[in-house]
Structure formats: C-alpha cells, structure tokens
C-alpha cells in the first residue's frame, strides 16, 4: 500500500472505478478446463488482465518416500510467477512471497480434498502466473479448484476465491492493479461451496465495521465466482459427453 493514496482518483463522477466497474463488480473471467494433455487435470483462467494456468498431477505415489503419510495423501501446491508476467521482470524462482502464497493456498484446499482416499500418495497442484494484474493468488485458487475436478480428485466441493479491499475510503470487490497499489486495504479470501472460509489474508487497515462490510461483500464475490466455475464445468463436461456425472 502506498502512502500517496490520497493523490489517486479511484472513482469517476458516477461512482465507477478506473476500469468502469461498480464497487461490487468483479472483473470478467474466462475459463478453459483441460488444456494440458500431460497433466491429470488442468485449467487456464483469465480474470481481468490476470492469466494463470493450473496443472494437477496425482494422486500418485509420494516422493521422496519420507513425505508419505500412512492414512492419507499429501497435498502440495506451488504458486509460481513467471518473470515475464509483470511490468518489471520478476526475479525467477521461489521467493518469500511465492512460498507464502503456496502455503496458504494449499491450506485453502486441505478441507475439501478427500485425501484419506489415497494413503501414501501425493496430489500436486502447480500454478503458473503468466500475466499478473493484482489478484493472482485468488485467480490461481479458482483455476486450481477446476483443475482438481478435471483430474478426478474427490473433493467435497469447489473452492472459490476473491479479494475485497478499501480504496478512496470505499469497500470494493476484486481490486485491480492501481487499486491494489494505491488503495488502503486488500483482503483476499477463499471459500468452500458450503460457505466455510479457508483463506483470509489482509494487507492494510480496516476498522471492525469495514471488515464486516468487506467480508459480506467478498462472500458475494466468491458466490459469483462459484457460478462462473460451475458454468465452465458444465461446458467442459457437456462437450465431453459426461454431463450427467457433473450435475449429480
Ligand atoms: P496478488 O497477485 O494475489 O494480488 P500481491 O498483492 O502480492 O498478490 O501482488 C499484487 C500484484 O503486484 C500482482 O498481481 C502483480 O501484478 C504485482 N507483483 C507482485 N509481485 C511482483 C514482483 N515480484 N514484481 C513485479 N510485480 C509484482
């Protein structure tokens, strides 16, 4: 968050944001499921100007063997930002930021993946950020959720993620890059289909009442994302001729 946030104009005279959205509107999302033939499941997702690719491998025997767990599969999640994905080249390889995002994203999925069905196995989720424009961790979680379904991994439901924040004194959904850079707060969350929050992070400051407002709004955002994810699954499985399996 920048200290020169007061210099930035976040809303026009009609109350619309720099990209023309209303405060409670998410950016357009495009999804294609099953884009990688060598992964067990995959998904390409665009959200505004973010472009991410998720690949799921497994369940397969966990290696190294010492990582295996007798009664369940281990879940690994790697979020990686390509150096060409940002305006100034991002330093390749793991960073504190990517390690943190990988950890919290894995934890966002742990409650929904039925891991005890696969003792000693590993389920690997890889996400590559190809183009970043704020909200990449939430875009990645949304893509990973669909790649898990595409891989046939048993899950209790989809995970949907969205960010909310405060810019120019207002609570807004799904921050874009200028809002993320110069806004007062950014709060990404992930939520299960039955409404359990599995990830909450916060950068910046919100009062308790603003936090409540933000949580209510972001849950609406996650519900919108969930509908888009479900529509993408319907499209994919209808095209594959397995429509009935998905809607049951
Ligand atoms: P998120 O992408 O989940 O919102 P951050 O809040 O950490 O995560 O990052 C916001 C945005 O800042 C990213 O989407 C990206 O556009 C940009 N960004 C993040 N890391 C870097 C980096 N190492 N170099 C350049 N830009 C970056």
Image (cartoon, rainbow, N blue to C red):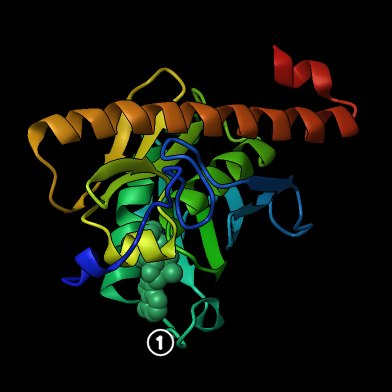
Residue 65 picture location, percent across and down = 40, 58
Q: Residue at x 48, y 47 (%)?
A: 141
47 displayed left or right of 192: right
Please name whichever residue, 192 or 170, is drawn nearer the observer in this view of the structure: 170
Please name whichever residue, 216 or 170, is drawn nearer the observer in this view of the structure: 170
Residue 83 picture location, percent across and down = 50, 83
Circle 1: element type? loop
Residue that label 1 marks: 91
24 displayed left or right of 171: right
- Vertical comparison of 247 with 168: above or below: above
Indicate yes or no: mark 1 CB to ligand 1 under 8 Å. Answer: yes
- Vertical comparison of 176 with 81: above or below: above
Q: Quadrant of ligand 1?
A: bottom left
Query: In which quadrant will I find the C terminus?
Result: top right
Which residue sits furthest top? 248
Residue 232 picture location, percent across and down = 71, 35
Q: Quadrant of residue 33?
A: top right
Q: Residue at x 80, y 32 (%)?
A: 235
Counting other residues with Cα less than 10 Å from the Cα at mark 1, is it few (<14), some (14-19), or many (20 or more)?
few
Query: In which quadrant will I find the N terminus?
Result: bottom left
């Amino acid at each position: 968050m920048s200290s020169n946030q007061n210099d930035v104009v976040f809303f026009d005279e009609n109350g619309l944001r720099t990209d023309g959205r209303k405060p409670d509107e998410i950016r357009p999302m495009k999804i294609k499921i099953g884009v990688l033939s060598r992964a067990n499941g995959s998904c390409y997702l665009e959200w505004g100007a973010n472009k991410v690719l998720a690949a799921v491998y497994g369940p397969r025997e966990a290696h190294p063997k010492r990582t295996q767990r007798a009664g369940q599969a281990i879940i690994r999640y790697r979020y990686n930002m390509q150096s060409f994905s940002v305006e100034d080249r991002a330093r390749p390889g793991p960073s504190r930021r990517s390690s943190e995002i990988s950890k919290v994203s894995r934890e966002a999925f742990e409650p929904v993946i039925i891991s005890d069905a696969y003792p000693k196995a590993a389920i690997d989720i890889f996400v590559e950020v190809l183009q970043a424009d704020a909200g990449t961790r939430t875009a990645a979680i949304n893509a990973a959720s669909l790649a898990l379904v595409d891989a046939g991994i048993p899950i209790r439901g989809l995970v949907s993620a969205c960010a909310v924040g405060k810019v120019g004194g207002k609570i807004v959904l799904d921050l874009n890059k200028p809002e993320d850079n110069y806004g007062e707060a950014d709060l990404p969350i992930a939520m299960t289909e039955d409404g359990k929050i599995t990830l909450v992070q916060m950068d910046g400051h919100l009062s308790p009442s603003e936090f409540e407002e933000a949580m209510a709004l972001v849950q609406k955002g996650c519900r919108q994302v969930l509908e888009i994810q479900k529509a993408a699954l319907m499209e994919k499985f209808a095209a594959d001729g397995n429509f009935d399996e998905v809607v049951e």
